[in-house]
Image: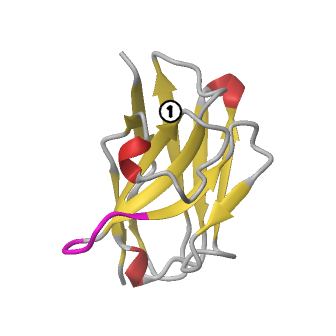
Amino acid sequence: QLQLVESGGGLVQPGGSLRLSCAASGFSIDYYAIGWFRQAPGKEREGVACIGNSGLRTSYADLVKGRFTISRDNAKRVAYLQMNSLKPEDTAVYYCAALSASFCYKDYAQSDYDVWGQGTQVTVSS
C-alpha cells in the first residue's frame, strides 16, 4: 500500500519555526516530485512548495518564499518542509503529496498527484 505520513505539526507562536516531515511507505520516492499543500478553514487547498525528484529543483508560493524551505532525502524516503518566521495566516492543515513526474510543473492539477498524506495541523498563535 502506497502511503505518505506527515508529522511535525503543532502550535507555535508567531515568528517561530516548525519542520514538517513526509515519510513514504510502500514505495520509493526516487521518481516522484513531492509537493506540500495547505488548507485553511473555509479556504481551498493551495500549493506551498515543490521539490523535483532529484532534489535539484524547488519552487515556492509567493506567500512563503524566503521563509519556507523544502528538501528531501530519497534514501530515507522522506521529504521535509522547514517553516521559519511563521505567521498566523500560515495556520492550516498541511499535506504532502507525490507526483509521478520529475517536477510539479504548473500544468499538473492537484488531482494528478498519485499519493496524498492525511495532513498535519499547524497553528500559529500567541
Magenta: main secondary structure: loop
Query: Count of labels shown?
Result: 1
Instruction: Check disc 1 and give the amino acid type.
Output: Ala
Q: Residue furthest front?
A: 107
Compared with 23, 59 (above or below) is: below
Residue 34 pos. (x, y %): 56, 43
Q: Quadrant of residue 106?
A: bottom right
Instruction: Reply above or below: 41 against 53.
Output: below
> How far across and how far down the image is residue 58, in percent?
71, 56
Report the residue at 33% width, 63% height from top.
Answer: 45
Q: Residue at x 50, y 32 (%)?
A: 23
Between 78 and 32, which is closer to the camera in this rendering? 32
Quadrant of the image occupied by residue 102 = top right
The residue sitting at 64% across, 74% down in the picture is 67
Q: Tag 1: Cα neighbours inside 10 Å, few (<14), some, or many (≥20)?
A: many
In-image side of 33 versus 115 (left or right)? right
**Stretch of the chain drawn in magenta:** 41-46
Q: Which quadrant of the figure has residue 30?
A: top right
Estimate the x, y position of residue 56 in percent, counting from the top left: 80, 47
Relative placement, left or right, of 79 versus 12 is right
Q: Which residue is mark 1?
A: 23
Q: Quadrant of the N terminus?
A: top left
Tell me what residue is drawn at x 40 percent, y 34 percent: 115
Q: Is residue 88 magenta?
A: no
What scheme was used to colour the molecule? secondary structure
Q: Is 42 in the magenta?
A: yes
The correct choice, above or below, for 47 with respect to 67 in the image is above
Q: Nearer the viewer, residue 101 or 70?
A: 101
